[in-house]
Each structure stands twice: as structure tokens, then as C-alpha cells.
Amino acid sequence: MCVGENNATRVAEYLNLQIGTLWENAVDCVKRQGTGLKPDDSHKYSFALAEFYYGSHQSTRQPSKGDMLFYASFGKPTLEFICNHTAILHLYIYEGHYNTDLSKVTSEIAPAILEHNRSFGKDTKLSFRVPFETSYISSPGSKFGKGHYAFSLHTFDYSKAELLSVVQELEPARQALSFYLSQYLQLLDGAGRHIFFSLPNFDDDRLRLSIDFSVASHTLLDIDKIQGISSEKINASLSVSWLKAAMLAGSANVTPAEHLAISLAEYRSTWLSHGSDVHFQVKLGPLRLKSLCNQEAVVLISVDEVTFFDTEDLKRAPRQRYTDWEIALLTNVVPIIEEDGTVIGVKLELNSSRFVPGLSHFTRYVESDKDASRYWSLFVTFITTRYLSILESAQYHIVYFNKSGDLWPQLLGPSEDVPDMHGFDQITTITQTAINEYFWSTWSGAQNSKSVVGTALASWSYNNLFSADFAPPTVRLLEPGDNGIKAIVWIHLRKGHLKGLRDWKPWTEGEQYSFEDCHLAFETELKIADHDELKDLSLWASHVEDSFVYKEHGAKADRILKHICLDLHSLNFLNELSRVDTLFKGKDKRPIEKLQALLVYVQAHYFPHLISTGLHVLHTVPVWNTGAPSLPSNALTKVEFHIHSKAVVHGGQVAKEAVIVIPGTVGSRQLPPPHGRQSWLDKWVVYATKGKLYGSVALSKRLFLGERLLSVLSHVNAITTLVPLPFSLRNGGWNVQLTTWAEGEAGRGGDSKWELDKEISGVLQYKWQHVGGWVYHYKGNDVGDHRFSVTSVTNNTLHIPTDFQRDITNIKLHGEVILRLEVAAAAQSWSAQSSATWAATVGAYSEAGGLQVKIISSVPPSFEKSRVEGNAVPTSHTDPESLLRSNLRVPESAELGQVLSEFKTFEGIWQSVYPGTSAYDLTHYVIEKNGDLLFELRPYPQLLPSEGLIQRTSNSVVDVVHTPQPVHDVDIRAARLQALGELTAKTPLKPPSAADQPRTSSFVEGIGFLQPLNIKEKTVDTVSERGNGSAHSLYVPKVVNGGRHVTTRTLSGNGFGTWGGA
């Protein structure tokens, strides 16, 4: 033992001597007391290291070792230490057998079937990786003379042992062997053969021996995980970090503030004072980790080139240059753990690092050369001390970190809440499917295009230095965070070639490389900018003038164009989501140089070209000036945009489709306060079913239903509501006269507004009710008692469906007018009543070119024959049916045409959002329970400039690897529709075929009609008026001829106040 030296080798020898002595004791014990059969329980521990039996002897024949399911006679075991936490236990089997009948291996009492026994070969070796711990036990010094001492113990955890390797002929029986040998290790544990003493140290100098098995080890196991994270992931993360540092180091102007960030790829001694007259510049390759165990790893520092100087001027000729060195360090690895115990990362405890010469190599270094030895010593000392501190200061000791745990967001439960517009007039959502489909269509059109614009999506070259064929790019929208609104862009390179770099710049003399099937992932920011703010659009300037959006809205003084763009100037390469393994399959010494060159060409040259052609513009939104004259009803005057990608589970299906959300207001209305945006954006996600959803457009109840549709339809109430006119008797005759609300006094002073009645299954039901009447009552000694009355009752209903209907959505109107006349006098007493009903339907359906709206049916009024009670027959002037026929108006094309005009704004190209240079139309509308109007967006059929009609004939273009849940071929619906609780995934959305076109019905079916009101006779001196309109003045004649003449007008209905007068 030597104090100050690593005594691990001596401790390993000491432990092997202990286990060897225990084995010899066991062998002797077997020789003296063994019977050649399974020992009894009192001897099993004594025999444990020498032999092991598993099974039971046959009771029907002479017992033998062959009865056993497993039997082995062992040679001397050995321990080989890998690190300070793991050792390998080597077992050597002299003779024995195992039984392959796996149905019996779980029951030791069952005898073996001899036919399934297989013998071990001579001197079979089996090895186990076993974790161990080192502990210390203090003992009172009185027993030993001079104080307290600590016993070092090494305790092996056999329950976690892992069978490492078996000879090839035993490989098919690995499962059975693992079981038998796990039982054997349990036996060793019970026998106490898992605890061994370290070297004794009972001197009085209180100095603990240095024991570092990790440094002394010359064996590296193939361990694929450390702290539960795969070594492949950790090394991929290190490669990404190194690549970013290397690209920064290769930039033209490196500032002192960037020295830390660069240190992973390059370092210069002049960046920090190090107190030596020797200076150096080192260029490094990616760090690599090799796991020793779950807690320790070897860190391999690749030194591509180190150059030494005798002066601080590193531009002078160097004194010495070395290449291809590798320095190995042992270090502890600790997990980064969330509060819930989830491991989200791994970091190195660099203060525990130890230099391992045996795992390092130094090409062309000659130790006998004094200058070389001085340089080597200075450099290795720097790397193993100060450089580690530099890495930790730059946070490079965190070798893996993934707080989200996955690219996809956490899943939420379903929601049946109907989304709210939250004060916005219009909300547009654009799915990432829409973005990717736009890139697909542009790429498809570029295959045969001669135009410069768009062809770069299919193929592109740069000055004979780079050339590639591409598949269409794909985009993944990300949940926004503190660093802005982000997306991941994948560039898919099918094949191509490039020339290498020199000083991180394309080099015409560079070596030419070929590549194929590469997929590069970049994180970038999404921004919204005015058209005039976009720069470097030289190739797009003329092309955009031929686009749908520019033809309609470009260069207009009353509006501007706002573009949602990918910021391709600022990108973050994501190695973990890229696939570049084909670059590493060749025989090139440094395949990483091909990746560096590929990234330089793509980022520094290809992306600027895409910008110049405007292909980074995803969507365009026209925004009007608030003071512009004659603003269209849907013209947005203020907008903002968000990304929302929170996943939703609905009906057993998982949504992983993100949306761009564009809320806005119209007219002079300001945007609502920004508080709580993300909380209600949850309602605007989309979910996967069996179709593709490109996006949706929602108009608020106030904007469409309240201010437009119901307002227009209120005119239907005005023309279908009959109002009796005041009357008097002339020469004993009664001439009843009627007018409509629209033409009468009431129509000039009030509105015939619809009132929400109730929500029934899938329908918003509105009503208009009006009751109007006059009573002429006179009484006197000379004339007797006479009463004449006329009453008109109007009941109109409006049914607006709120459930999704595949082919056509119908808005249904129904009306009923009841006219009743009554006479009560000495000469005659009778009553007569008739009614009339009418119906009309306006339908909207989707076809190529967008939404189409038309009058489905306008049912002629149906008149009920007058029902007369009493002893007199009414004349033609007092016949209710005749009066209804001559006075009732029903809504026809002229009136319903106003409804059509309101919907006409939804036909054809939708004017509020445009994908790139293309357009959308609207399809499949639904009015929600809360009154908001929702449409689906759909690509507008179009001829691209100078190109043919773009129609997608294939569902897939490229197999996008490493793109979580590929965005192509996913059928989508809006979760807003599903929130209604009535949209199912049974029927895919599609335009109706000719056979599906709606048929005109002779009558509106499925509507519950209001029953006629029961109008009772009343003699009152007051007027009761109720309804949807406002109150009107009464005409009350004076007393005539000594009699009391009172004319009473009775108006009743939903919404009227009640008032009266004499």
C-alpha cells in the first residue's frame, strides 16, 4: 500500500484473494461432506461457491445429478472492477447441465425431464455486471490501542446483476440460464458471499487510502444508458452543441463575449491569462460520452488540431502542431430531476474528473522530446483543469436537457364547452396541415415550371458548389413560450452534391461530396409584418402582383397587407430532429465536415434564396384603415396572431394538430385586452378524424347573426304581420280593413325584431309574436248593447341549425296568422275565424368555388276555411278567410333575396386570409349554440401563374422521419364544431355530388308549430299591448249621442309593455 497513490489494483487483488479463499474452503467442504447429490439446507451455504443444485431428485428411481433442473460445479470466481460502482463477476463452470423446459424452471420441486437436459461445455465462462457500494464502519479505538478506525466494506447487490455474455452455443438458452443463475446469486447473497473487506488500514496517521477503480480499469462495457437516458441521445445532444459552437467559431467576427460559447469547438490561450510563455490554439471535435455505469462515464475530448506558439501572436508560424489527439477523463454523472421525480437531463460533475492516460492517445507525441513534453504537459494540465471550468461556465457540463420530455405537448381531456369569441369580431385558424399542403402544391407545380419563383422548392444549385433535389418542406408549429412564437421547419434533401468548406466558406477547390436522403430540422420564429417591411424580395416582387391577394388588395390606400412569415434569417439547427445518418455511411475520415458544409449552404445561401422568392410568407391578411369609407362588413381593421398547439383527446382520438389563430375586429372597435389569451385558445385546437381541415373562420354573433341576418329577417316579420285598422259602423255596415306592420303606423315607429325562444336539439329557435285588435263597443237606451271586435295573431318562427350537416344547411322560416271577428248584438251574435300558414327555406351548400346560397323553397300560403259560430253568416267584408287572402303577404324572392345578399359575401374567394399567393374559399358552415358563425377554409381551385391546374393526386410525397406524427394524411375537423356535441366523425366533409343536391320540399318538415292563441272576449277601458315592438298611441273616440262609445285596441306579444288609458 502506498499513500498518495491509487490502490485500486491492490484492493481488487485483495478482494479476489478473499473470494478465492472462500471458494477453496467450499471445495474442501464438498470433498469432505458432499454426497454427489443436492445438499441439505445445513450445507447449502457451505457448498455455495463450489457447486449449485436447482430442482429435486426423482423418488421413483435412484437419485442422480441428472434429476436436477440445473447443476454446476464451479471453478474459482473472479471480480473485475469497471468503475467505482460496478464490477464484473466471472463464474467458471467445470461441469454441469441445465434444463430447457421453461415450464418447470419456476418450480424447484419438479424433477427434470432428462430429454431436456443440456450439458455445459468444458470450462464454460459466464459473466455478470453487478453494482456495488463502498461503506465505512467505525470501531472504538480501545480495542486496537490508539483511537477510532474505519473498516471499508464493499457490498455487491446481486439482485441487480445482469448477465453480460454467454458463449454462442448457450445463447438460445439465455432466458433459462438467467433464471437459474439468478437463483444461484440469491444463494450467494444468503451465504454472505456478497460482502468483502477492503484493504485493512489500522495505522494511526488517520490518512484514508486512495482507491479509484474507475481510473485503474481498462475495460469499457457497452452500456447504452446512463441515468435512464440513452448514450445515443446524450452524444447526439453533444454533437448539436458542438456544431453550433463550431459554426459560431467559423463566423467572420467573433467577439470576446462569444468566447465561452465557442469554447466547445475552439479555444485560444490568449483569451485568458494563463501565466505561461507558451501559447496555443486548439480546434476540438464533438465531446463523446462512454458510460461506465449509471453514475460514471468516460468523457472523450477530441483534439482535431492543437498548435503551439512562443508568442501571443497566433498568426505567426507555430513551433509545433499535433492532430488527432484524444484525451479521456473519468467523471461522475448526475441526473437533473423535476419535482415529480422525472429525469429531464444529465450533467457532469466536472470537479470529480480524473485524467485517464490508459484511455487517451496522442498521435506523433514523443515523450523524450523535451519541447514536446513541455507542450504536452501544459496542454493536458489546461484541459484537465481550467478548460473544465470554462465548459462549466458556458453550461456545457449539462450534456442533455429536455424539460418538455417530448416534442408533443401534454394531452388534455375533452371539452364540451362552446368556444367564446372573447370580444373579437372574427377569428381565423390556420392549421399546420394548410401550411404543409401549400408547400406541397407549390412544390408540385414547380416540377415542370420554368419560373424562378417556386422552383427552388424542387431543385436548386449554387455556383457549381452545391446542387440538390428537394421534397416539399414541412412545418411543425410549436406552443409559444417566453422566446416568442416558434415553428420547426424540415428541409428534405433527396439527393445532391456539394464542395467542402475552407474557413467556413464555400471553396471551389474543396473536395466534392455526394449525399442523399437528408432531413434537416431548424427552429425558427414566426413573425407578422407589413408588406412594406419585408426586405430582400427581389424575385417575388413581380410574381406577387399576379397573386389573388395582390390583385384584390394590393397597392390600395385604404388597406395594408400583413404577412405571417417564417424568419429564415434566424435559425437554430436541431440535430435531434434531423436525419443525416447517410452522411456518416461513407469512408470519409471526418463526415461531420460534410454536415457542416451542408448546413452552411442551406442556411447561408438556400434560405436567403427562398426569402427572395417570397416562399417564407405563409399567409397574408388584408387590414383596412379604420377611417376608410364604405368598409366591407367583414373588413378587419385590427388583428393579432398566436400559435396554439395544445393537444386534445376526443372520442378516443388524439389531436396533434396545431393552429395559427388570427383574431381581429372590424370597424372602429379596438382589440380586447390581452389578458388570458392562452386560456381560451384551448377551445380553438383541431382534432384528427377522417378528413383534412385547412382552417376555420368564425364570425361573432354580434357581427353576423345580430347585426345582419336577424336584422334582415326582421323584415319578414314586418310584411307577414297583419294589423287591423280602426273602424266604425256606417249605416249599420261593418267594413273590416287590415294592413301589414311594414305599411302601417306600427312599422314606422318600431322594429319587428326576432327574440330567442329556446334551444332545442341542434336548432336555435327564434320567435316573433304579435297580437293586435280593435273592439267597437256602443251601448244606449235607444240602441241597446253592441260589440264588434277584430283580432289578428301572428306567430312566426325561425329555425337556425346548430348541428353540422354534410351536404346542405337550411335556415327555415314558418309563419301563421290567425284572424278572428266577433259580433255580439241583439240582432246578431256570431264569430268567425280563419288562419293562414306559410314557409320558406334558404339553403347553403358547398361546391367547387366555395359556398353557394339559394332559396330552397317558398311554400305558398295555405288558408283555412272560415269557421263560423252563431246565427249570422259574415259578408265578404267580414269573412276572415277572404280578408287573409286579400291582405296577407308572404316572403318571396325579393324579401329572401336580402338574406341571400348577406350570404353572398361568403361565396367565392374568402377575402380575409390568403395562403402565400393562393386563396381559400369557405365551405360547411354552422351557426353555433351561442350564435357565432363558423366556416371551414378550403383551398380555392386555381390555376397558378404560367402553370397548370394543381390537383393533388397522391396523399403522400415523402416519408418525413423524425417528424412526430407526420402532418400529411391526417384527417382533421375543428374542435369548435365538436364542442357542439353533435358533429361526429362518421361522415367525411366533402362537396355534395349531383345526386346529393337538395330537393325542394312541398312543406317544411320537422318543425313544431305554435298553437293558435285562445283569444277571449273582454270588455275593457284599457289597452294591453305586448310584443317585440315599442308602444303606440291609441285612438279613443269621445262619447257620442249620450252613449258611451269606447274603441279599444288590444296588442299583445313577446316584448311589449302593458299600459292603458280611457
Image (cartoon, rainbow, N blue to C red):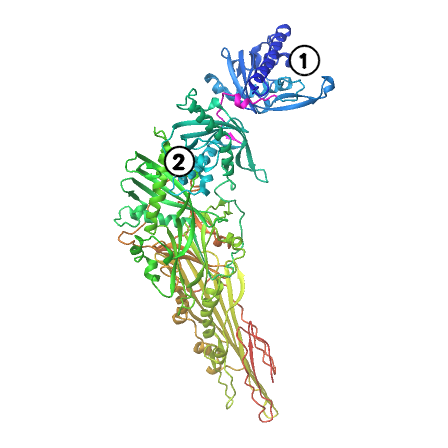
Q: Amino acid at mark 1?
A: Ser
Residue 1026 in view: yes
Mark 1 residue crowding within 10 angstroms, few (<14) / some (14–19) / many (20+) = few
Q: What's the CA distance linking mark 2 and mark 1?
A: 79 Å
Mark 2 residue crowding within 10 angstroms, few (<14) / some (14–19) / many (20+) = few
Asked if the magenta segment contains residue 217, the reply would be yes
| Residue 895 position in % (x across, y down) | 41, 71
Q: Residue at x 51, y 11 (%)?
A: 123
**Which numbered tag is attached to residue 313?**
2
| Residue 244 position in % (x across, y down) | 42, 39
Q: Nearer the viewer, mark 2 or mark 1?
A: 2
For residue 569, side relative to residue 170 (left or right): left
Q: Residue at x 50, y 87 (%)?
A: 733
| Residue 198 position in % (x across, y down) | 62, 18
In this view, the residue in front, 735 or 94, is: 94
In this view, the residue in front, 874 or 897, is: 897
Up/down of 810 relative to 959, above or below: below
Q: Amino acid at mark 2?
A: Asp
Q: Quadrant of the C terminus?
A: bottom right
Up/down of 368 relative to 797, above or below: above
Q: Are marks 2 and 1 in contact (CB under 8 Å)?
A: no
Helix, strand or loop status at disc 2: loop
Q: Which residue is mark 1?
A: 42
| Residue 93 position in % (x across, y down) | 53, 13
Q: Quadrant of the N terminus?
A: top right
Asked if the magenta segment contains residue 999, the reply would be no
Task: Identify the magenta region.
Answer: 209-226
